Image (spheres, rainbow, N blue to C red):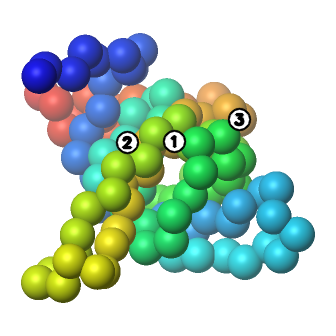
Amino acid sequence: MIREERRKSPRASCGAEVEYVIMDHARATTFTTGSKNVGSGGICIIVFEQLEVGDVLGLKFSIPGLSTSILAKGVVIWTNEFSVGDQKTDSAYNVGIKFLNLNNEGRDKIQKYVEAKTK
């Protein structure tokens, strides 16, 4: 089955280091992970704890080649569990995040990165 593309902006592969915090949890623990791809509308990260659709995250990440970090707020719109290594009991999750709050400077940096990677 072919999945229909619903993104409004193009994405590019991006192995950025991402720090995130779950905004609606009483305990504000910061996690560090990596990303799979990014676009001006959102980012896909890889996590080892299960996040729920609708979770709101505070994000800080750097685009490769840029010296400044991008700060954003986003909402989890989908998750996809997968097995890690040889153990079927170890799981990780691809998590699709839609940006809710991203300033114009951050959006411009992402768009330039995506344009350069997709040429």
Residue 67 seen: no
- Residue designated by label 1: 97
Give the mark count.
Answer: 3
The residue indicated by pointer 3 is 101
Is 80 rendered above or below residue 46?
above
Q: Residue at x 59, y 35 (%)?
A: 99
Residues marked 2 and 3 touching at CB (< 8 Å): no
Q: Earlier in the sequence, mark 2 or mark 3?
A: 2
Q: Amino acid at mark 3?
A: Asn
Q: Is residue 21 left or right of residue 94?
A: right
Q: Report helix, strand or loop for mark 2.
A: strand
- Which residue is rendered at x = 43% and y = 67% of the image? 47
Q: Is residue 10 visible?
A: yes
Earlier-in-chain disc, 2 versus 1:
2
Residue 65 occupies quadrant: bottom left
Q: Residue at x 47, y 30 (%)?
A: 40
**Mark 2 = which residue?**
38
Spot the residue most to the front: 89
